[in-house]
Amino acid sequence: MKKNVIKGLGTALLLSGLLVGCSSNSSGGDGGGKVVVDVFNIKVETKDQLEAMIEKYESENENVDINLTTVGGGQDAASALQAKFSSNEEPAIFLLGGLSDAEKYQKYLLDVSDMESAKTAIDGTLQGSTIDGTPYGIPLNIEGFGWMINKEIFTSAGVDPASIASYDDFVKAVETIDSKKEELGLEAVFGFSGKEDWVTSQFSNHFTAPEFDNDLNVAYESTELTYKYGDRMKEYTDLINQYNVQPILSLDYSTSVEELFINDKVAIIHQGNWIVPSLDSIDPTFSQEKLGILPLYVSGDDEGFISAGPSWFWGINKEKDEEVVETSKDFIDWMYTSDYGKQQIVEEFKYIPAHDGYDIESITDPVSKEVYQMLLDEKARVWAHNQHPNGFGSTAFFPEYQKYLNGDISWDEFTATTSSKFTEMR
């Protein structure tokens, strides 16, 4: 898959596939003669940008009302989406986290293969929403995550981030920064959000992706989680916990990113390039001058990888009225294939595009460019954790991982319990 993604990215993207307003003449629905489309979004970081995109689309399609619901950033988005379906308030458009979500909502999901935004998706980027050869989602973007660092703090501590080329180098960097914590004005080296299940789940990806051969289908079909790289995961976990803001279990996303990291109070957090819009909204210079990304060394001491690839997919609810389905398709196509949409995706959303027809040079923040380059250099692993059994990350892995962080259970107990639950939930 990755080679196909890279090949597609490298074509530099010439196909535009402009599509504007093809269903705007439809009428009916619930909005006083207007077509009403309910969108369920979990990307809180780009909520404002999506609202602006919707406003623009509505201005060009006056018979359409798009209602946006955004749940995330510390809220249980998966449960909130499930509640929508359980209460017969199913959205017309909603985000899928991967193959498990595609399977869970498959009976509602439209085959998107005839959509322009599917045809222009970069080779391989539909794999995370494809079941038995049918794609059920349009890739939101390409996102990468790993250690997000404040390069200025590293430099002030006498540590060159570019010199970190192994796990031991990373440990020494952490110890060096910690030794100068007071003069640097830090609360701690790490600001790891132990309160967020999605942060811990993403952290686990660095260790499960190589166990599943860095292949989404292998991860999705696996009935076992053996923690092949559990020893390194334990080393990283213990390092984080020793040098983190405490209590680690109380540290949420907002405090970690929007208070501690942006204000130079911690040097390292575990996040991805999706935090750039949030950082820019507080201090536009931070992402340009201070933000960097470092890989994790898992399967080898001197070979580091971040995780990167299509993270989320827009699914369309085929059970809605035909005019709602057609308008939903039109909106998503417009979002990714119109000139305006492409400009917004790169410049305002700060996304790394997962579609052809974009000018990659227009990516403005250095970390997104770095993520893109690491993907090209095959220094990135797939989002395997999104293929774990439904609910595993939040209901099985997260509580047990928290128990370990809190010293309530041993590492052997953590791995034994979560391995058993992985098989049971599959």
Image (cartoon, rainbow, N blue to C red):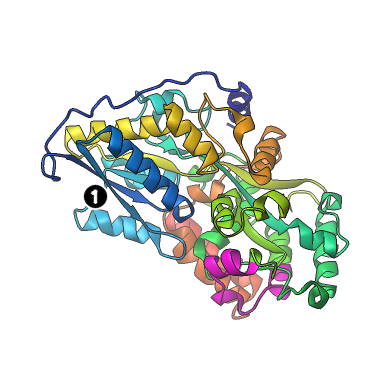
- Residue 166 seen in the figure: yes
**Whether residue 135 is visible:** no
The image quarter in which residue 119 lies = top left
Secondary structure of the residue carrying numbered label 1: loop
Q: Is residue 155 left or right of residue 356?
A: right
Residue at image point 62% right, 24% down = 7
The range drawn in magenta is 238-260
Quadrant (top left/top right/bottom left/bottom right) for the N terminus: top right
Q: Total of numbered circles in the picture? A: 1
Residue 300 percent across, percent down from the top left: 78, 49
Q: Is residue 97 above or below residue 75?
A: above
Could you say where residue 257 lies in the image, as x and y percent from the top left?
Answer: 59, 63
Q: Is residue 175 left or right of residue 50?
A: right
- Front position in the image: 170 or 182: 182
Q: In the image, is 407 to the left or to the right of 14?
A: right
What x and y, as percent, mark residue 148?
67, 56
Confirm whether the magenta stretch covers residue 161: no
Task: Give above or below for 242 relative to 99.
Answer: below
Residue 193 spot, x, y in % from top left = 58, 67
Is residue 255 one of those drawn in magenta? yes
How many residues crowd mark 1 within 10 Å: few (<14), some (14–19), many (20+)?
many
User: Which residue shows up at 18% across the image and 33% down it?
Assistant: 323
The residue that mark 1 highlights is: 90
> Of residues 249 and 302, which is closer to you in this image?
249
Magenta stretch mostly in which secondary structure?
helix
- For badge 1, the amino acid type reads Glu
Q: Is residue 107 above or below residue 414?
A: above
Rendering quarter of residue 158: bottom right
